[in-house]
């Protein structure tokens, strides 16, 4: 029987949730595996949780949808609450324990998904003062979709096989750059599942961001650092 890994990733619109799933699906295809990716966008007027459902298998994939995930990754306090139904006794649960809360955004940005975690700032003409400047010359200034807050309430964490907390948002913001938040999460998913080799994700990143990497080689280094940082965080916790 084919080994199928069921992955559910959830976060705020703009955190790059759907892009994480797309990169994983592309990498799986390139490795000769089957992948089935179904996006689910939030319907709340401001913000809203976006969920990506992804299955990766060595053989055929059965039902397109699933309830219980093998690995569940909620990336905001609201996503933790929204995804309770997808956690089960055999689920590996990886969540972001950064001290954040969701930011409210203008209606025109709701549902928009970017590979870069921070899309063009919907609430200000300039980037937040605590954000770094442009990485690639000429890119639109961006601002974070999160703000300081209490973080995830431990009481909201469901009963699962294993819980792993990683400070992905804090690492991205304070050590690397907010744009590579979701690349940290990519590394964490690979470490938790071993479903794909890390090099396959690097190849997928090259395919999607190759032109930006060529324009600014430091951007490649930072993405690779973020990928490996997320991978090592979870491997140590496993």
Image (tube, grey):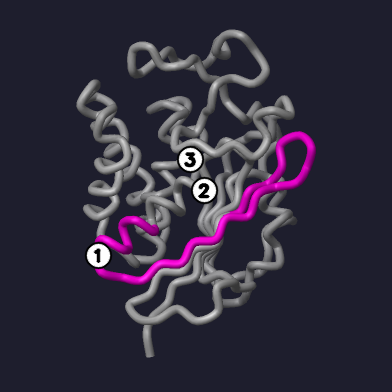
Q: Which mark is residue 168?
A: 3
Is there CB contact under 8 Å for labels 3 and 2? no
Q: What's the residue at 76%, 34% (across, down)?
A: 46
Magenta range: 25-51
Q: What's the residue at 50%, 64% (across, down)?
A: 7
* Vertical side of 1 occupied by 13: above or below: above
Disc 1 to disc 3, C-alpha distance: 27 Å
Q: What's the residue at 34%, 51% (across, down)?
A: 231
**Residue 138 coordinates in the image, percent (x, y):** 38, 12
Q: Which mark is residue 206?
A: none
* Vertical side of 107 occupied by 68: above or below: below
Q: Which mark is residue 31?
A: 1
Closer to the chain start, of discs 3 and 2, is 2
Can you tell which quarter of the image residue 1 is in?
Answer: bottom left
**Residue 129 coordinates in the image, percent (x, y):** 55, 10
Is there CB contact under 8 Å for labels 1 and 3? no
Disc 1 to disc 2, C-alpha distance: 20 Å
Mark 1 secondary-structure assignment: loop
Identify residue for label 2: 18
Within-10-Å neighbours for mark 2: few <14, some 14–19, many 20+:
many
Mark 3 secondary-structure assignment: helix
- Look at discs 1 and 3 and give the one toward the viewer: 1
């Amino acid at each position: 029987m084919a080994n199928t890994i069921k992955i559910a990733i959830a976060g705020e619109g703009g955190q790059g949730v759907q892009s994480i799933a797309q990169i994983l699906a592309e990498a799986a295809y390139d490795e000769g595996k089957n992948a089935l990716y179904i996006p689910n966008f939030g319907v709340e007027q401001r913000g809203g949780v976006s969920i990506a459902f992804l299955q990766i298998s060595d053989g055929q994939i059965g039902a397109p949808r699933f309830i219980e995930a093998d690995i569940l990754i909620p990336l905001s306090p609201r996503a933790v609450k929204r995804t309770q139904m997808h956690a089960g006794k055999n689920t590996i649960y990886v969540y972001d324990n950064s001290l954040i809360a969701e930011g409210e955004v203008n209606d025109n940005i709701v549902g928009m998904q970017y590979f870069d975690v921070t899309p063009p700032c919907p609430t200000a003409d300039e980037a937040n003062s605590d954000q770094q400047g442009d990485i690639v010359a000429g890119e639109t200034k961006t601002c974070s979709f999160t703000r300081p807050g209490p973080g995830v309430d431990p009481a909201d964490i469901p009963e699962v096989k294993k819980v792993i907390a990683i400070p992905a948002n804090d690492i991205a913001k304070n050590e690397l750059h907010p744009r590579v938040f979701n690349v940290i999460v990519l590394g964490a998913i690979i470490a938790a599942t071993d479903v794909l080799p890390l090099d396959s994700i690097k190849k997928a990143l090259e395919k999607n961001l190759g032109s930006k990497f060529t324009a600014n080689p430091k951007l490649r280094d930072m993405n690779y650092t973020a990928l490996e940082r997320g991978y090592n965080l979870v491997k140590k916790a496993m």
